Amino acid sequence: MTTAKTDITIRHLAEHGGELVTLRGWLEGGRSSGKIAFLKVRDGSGVVQVIVSRKEVSEDAWEAAKGVTQESTVEVTGTVNLDERAPGGVELHATEFSVLFLTEDYPITPKEHGVAFLMEHRHLWLRSSRQRAALRVRSEVCQAIRDFYYERDFTLIDSPILTPAACEGTSTLFETDYFGDPAFLSQSGQLYLEPAAAALGKVYCFGPTFRAEKSKTRRHLMEFWMVEPEVAFLEFPGLCELAEEFVQYLVGRVLERCATELETLERDTAVLERYASEPFARTTYTETIDFLQAQGQEIAWGDDFGAEHETLVGEHFGKPVMITHFPSAMKAFYMQPDADDPKLALGLDIIAPEGYGEIVGGSQRIHDHDLLLRRIQEHELPQEAFQWYLDVRRYGSYPHSGFGMGLERFVAWMCKMSHVRETIPYPRMLNKIYP
Ligand code: 4AD
């Protein structure tokens, strides 16, 4: 008798047609008649249909197959049968079947559940097919981010999470006690990357970021992941090119490596192909205000865009849009003014279409010491806390630029998920931190 292979995962079953394998996993669902059971088994790498035929297995195995419940842990041995009609082109004809753990009353059933209920059961909801697909896309995007910068000779600089001062405004800081002094969870690694760019030229950080935003929207998390490149001697036009090349690379990688997941998510891939290959639309802040006013929106020059404005802009162009040249007054203290019109900042936002809004924010940085000091004072930031940051402009100052991209917003857009909460394993949202 042939011994069954035990080291093959469902993902690779199709490479083992005709072989006998043993799998362990969980029962997603199934149906059985008096003679035959069709069971969907998941092992973490994929799902396969297992066919248990009464006359081909022992009485114990048949009883086990008949009585198995949703999300029970199971072990199955069977022959791999390649069949084009089966999902994934493969099914398993069981010779043995046993239940390792019989699950009772699994809370998430195939019927519709409300989001509040699913969020309370996030630890179990992860097992559902859409959630699995989104988390795999996330994992692929993380890998692609690292590959993109690695292939271009960037050095990874891990910026600290506990910080003594704000980067992106003081209103969204999570404060904690640092041996009697206040410390804040990082809102951005940027300030720490700028000195590192003078040491290593091209650097990036990629890690968790915290914003105590009192926003309950489908685009906001309290804890999200941000990737931030920072490049010495890169000026604004080069920054725009880098951001476009980066976003297109990531879309391309998702298309290339996540075909199964995009299918599960019913994502229109033709549209993604277009985003990956066509140049992004480019416009300025002022042109965008004119456009929005022409659309009947109540918005004035100097106002920030709201979600509905970003959606309108995205819809108008039907592809990612790079908006540049914002009023300095509405942007962060560190943005370089435009030489032709100093009331404008050399900042850029990338708006994702299909209602996903801003996914990238960046700028050229002020490299003149006295101007930066003035901006710190105007923004009423604690000057002592920024001495080290000003040092970058005291010793070998140099023009430099960078941007930040929110991972969850990007993944939500790729997956066409209606809310960023489904793109991170355990979302942290306004007043919600369970589980
Ligand atoms: O535009 P932001 O605030 O830029 C910065 O933090 C700069 N310091 C980055 C840099 O230049 N190095 O944030 C960048 C991106 C946004 O475009 C968005 O994708 C994401 O971070 N983001 C959020 N994502 C989820 N939830 C939130 N609350 C977010 N806030 C920002």
Image (cartoon, rainbow, N blue to C red):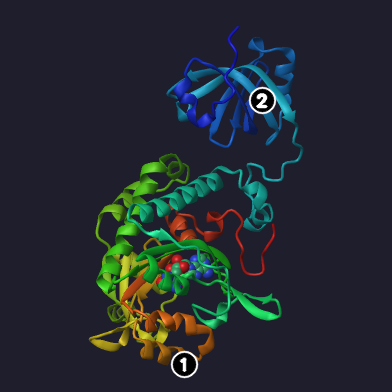
Q: Is residue 145 above or below residue 194?
A: above
Q: Earlier in the sequence, mark 2 or mark 1?
A: 2
Q: Is residue 38 above or below residue 256?
A: above
Q: Which residue is mark 2?
A: 75
Instruction: Say few, some or many: other residues with alpha carbon within 10 Å of mark 2 (under 14 / 14 to 19 / 20 or more).
Output: some
Asked whether the viewer can see residue 386, the reply is: yes
Give me the disc on residue 262: none
Q: Is residue 106 left or right of residue 358?
A: right
Q: CA distance from mark 2 to mark 1?
A: 66 Å
Residue type marked 1: Gln
Residue visible at 40% across and 50% down in the picture: 144
Residue positioned most to the top: 1
State the image coordinates of residue 270 (x, y, percent, origin top left): 32, 48
Q: Is residue 215 above or below residue 337?
A: above
Give me the disc on residue 377: 1
Residue positioned most to the left: 340
Residue visible at 56% across and 27% down in the picture: 49
State the image coordinates of residue 356 (x, y, percent, origin top left): 43, 63
Residue in the foreground of this view, choosing between 224 and 295:
224
Residue in the foreground of this view, choosing between 153 and 418:
153
Q: Is residue 120 left or right of residue 228?
A: right
Residue visible at 28% across and 73% down in the picture: 236
**What SS does tag 1 mark?**
helix
**What SS does tag 2 mark?**
strand
**Circle 2 or circle 1, nearest the eye:** 1
Residue type marked 2: Glu
Instruction: Say few, some or many: other residues with alpha carbon within 10 Å of mark 1 (under 14 / 14 to 19 / 20 or more).
Output: few
Residue in the foreground of this view, choosing between 107 and 11:
11
Q: Quadrant of the C terminus?
A: bottom right
